[in-house]
Amino acid sequence: MSDIVVTLPDGSELSVAPGSTVEDVAYEIGPGLGEDTVGGVVDGDLAGREEPLEADCELVIITEDSEEYLRALRHSAAHVFAQALQRLYPEAKLAIGPPTDDGFYYDVAGVDLDADDLEDIEAEMYDIIEADYDIERVERSHEEALERYADNPYKRDILEEEAAGAETVSFYVQGDWEDLCRGPHVESTGEIGAVELLNIAAAYWRGDEDNDTLTRVYGTAFETEDDLEAYLERREEAKKRDHRRIGQEMDLFSIPDVTGPGLPLFHPNGKTVLRELRAFVDDLNGGEGYDFVETPHLFRTELWKQSGHYDNYVDDMFLLDVNDEEYGLKPMNCPGHATIFNEGNWSYRDLPVRYAENGKVYRKEQRGELSGLSRVWAFTIDDGHLFVEPDDIEREVDVIMEQIDEVLETFDLDYEVALATRPEKSVGSDEIWEQAESQLRDVLDSGGLDWDLEPGDGAFYGPKIDFAFEDALGRNWDGPTVQLDFNMPERFDLTYTGQDNDEHRPVMIHRALYGSYERFFMVLVEHFDGNFPTWLAPEQVRILPISDDNVGYAKQVKNRYLGDFRVEIEDRSWKIGKKIRTAHDDRVPYMLVVGDDEEAAGTVSVRDRFEAERNDVDVERFREHLRAEVEEKRVEPDFVG
Ligand SMILES: [Zn+2]
Ligand SMILES: [Zn+2]
């Protein structure tokens, strides 16, 4: 029998004898990997280490470090939850129970649960884990599946929608319990090291407010008890740092009912932070040859039809009728920028053309999905679109990568980079895809970065580079994206005259350094626990007169020396201890304490928010330090420390 071809995630191919196991292939790649292998994903399905490969396939090797493994483990924990629930409440009906980024949930009906019930269910879950049932995949006919779920409208709905027309569907069986499921799962319930049920919420079936209200139980699972403990600690810390809570404490923003869901109001303190963030990227863009443009918040739907948003995105758009004509609030800024480009006559000498706009966009997220500033209906993107000759992709993307690096470094955010390449369905010629992807690879290689390849994960209209960064709590966030686009230039018939005097298509590059200001703001609030770097802090310095007699001197210090900074004077007649505590609670980076001694000597006492202190400071010296700290965008106040 001839060899089969196994395609690995980096696109490389390996010929092996049919019947080789996942583990055999891993050893073929390297002995270390072979030893660490716990399983594989074969053509998208999780498979055990011993699974024989009989035909050509795509294979991702899974080690205990793989994200896929943890997701499979958590999905298995969701099943264990459902099994435990039905042991205790046989009347409970199951809807869906997927893994999430940090755990799992299961939506159920027919039971009324409270926090105490969760403890009982958790104890039952540990019994199931200890019993170490094998988790086995079983195929059943579609008809039989419908019969089994005669009194479960949710599973029937799944069978009639997602699984419509399928001859067989898969169930996963553990002990005497089973669930309609596509998998993947770990091999037995005993692989789950630790579980915790976290909380109960309400959810609509299929997220639709017109459907049944279900009970959603959130939980998480890990391979070890230690991993779970570490996670619970991080979660506790994240709760303390919740941006909604800090936002209220620092008077940064609000989302009151009267304005509508997902429509945040930035108060003066929050807007100060936004203005600084904006000035930072405007400066970066101005320095790299971007032209600033401005476009309105709504356009006729003609434009959205031309851009393709009307066909693909209309459910998420806010539409309105004006004099019998349909308009749509913009969900993206690109069509406006493409149209501006189209109003000009361009030669190769004019390219690249780079447009930047801090543009507000509107996306109709489901109300149940809205949460603080992380998911909103209205947000601003620090958007940029470049129109470049195909040969210039590498040079332009290189500059964008440097900009992104500068932004993330400034906030002390470590990041990872991945290149997502051509998917099966795509527009654009082979030539342009190959040219673009090889230039992106060159950029990534020349940057000396470790980067991942995500084969086939690009958009249908072009490859992209994705950034993911990690915050101070060890949480991972989707970061900036550099997206190449071969489609929109076609749809808008964008052209430039080349050196050969013929008309050519530019490539469009979409990029943002923060992405959504609102979401980035939220991440910063939690990352810094509200202790913004001095350059961002709404109030940079607070002067604290020891007695009312020193208020005049405080004003002198402020007016004579600190006019370029955001400085307040605490002139309430409080004891100095209370003034210091209050400034500390308000997260002001610097406090200047002034009493009779300071007034006589013409100095100040400097305290920072870490409670470090230095007396007899020359005010001019402090000012020069502050200027440098702000200009260099240092992360922590460092005058005293
Ligand atoms: Zn499942
Ligand atoms: Zn765009």
Image (cartoon, rainbow, N blue to C red):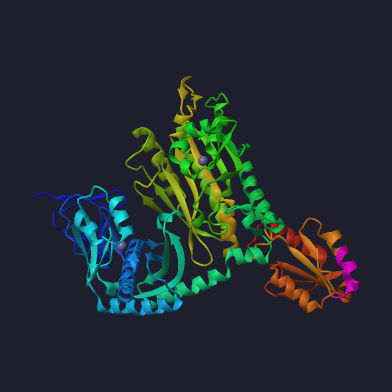
Give the quadrant of the C terminus: bottom right
Q: Does the magenta stretch include residue 621?
A: no
Q: In this view, does 360 lie above or below 145?
A: above
The residue lying furthest to the top in this view is 501
**Residue 194 image point, x, y percent:** 36, 75
Q: Is residue 126 left or right of residue 134?
A: right
Q: In this view, does 119 lie to the left or right of 553?
A: left
Q: Does the magenta stretch include residue 550?
A: yes
- Residue 353 in view in this figure: no
As rendered, which of 212 and 79 lies closer to the eye? 212
As rendered, which of 270 and 114 lies closer to the eye? 114
- How many marks the image carries: the answer is 0
Name the magenta segment's main secondary structure: helix
**Residue 203 image point, x, y percent:** 44, 61
**Residue 393 image point, x, y percent:** 47, 38
Q: In which quarter of the image is residue 252?
A: bottom right
The residue lying furthest to the left in this view is 1
Q: Is residue 540 left or right of residue 220?
A: right
Q: Which residue is drawn at 44% across and 76% down?
A: 229
**Residue 302 image point, x, y percent:** 51, 30
As rendered, which of 464 and 305 lies closer to the eye? 305
Q: What segment is highlighted magenta in the picture?
A: 546-555
- Residue 549 in view in this figure: yes
Q: Residue at x 62, y 57 (%)?
A: 257
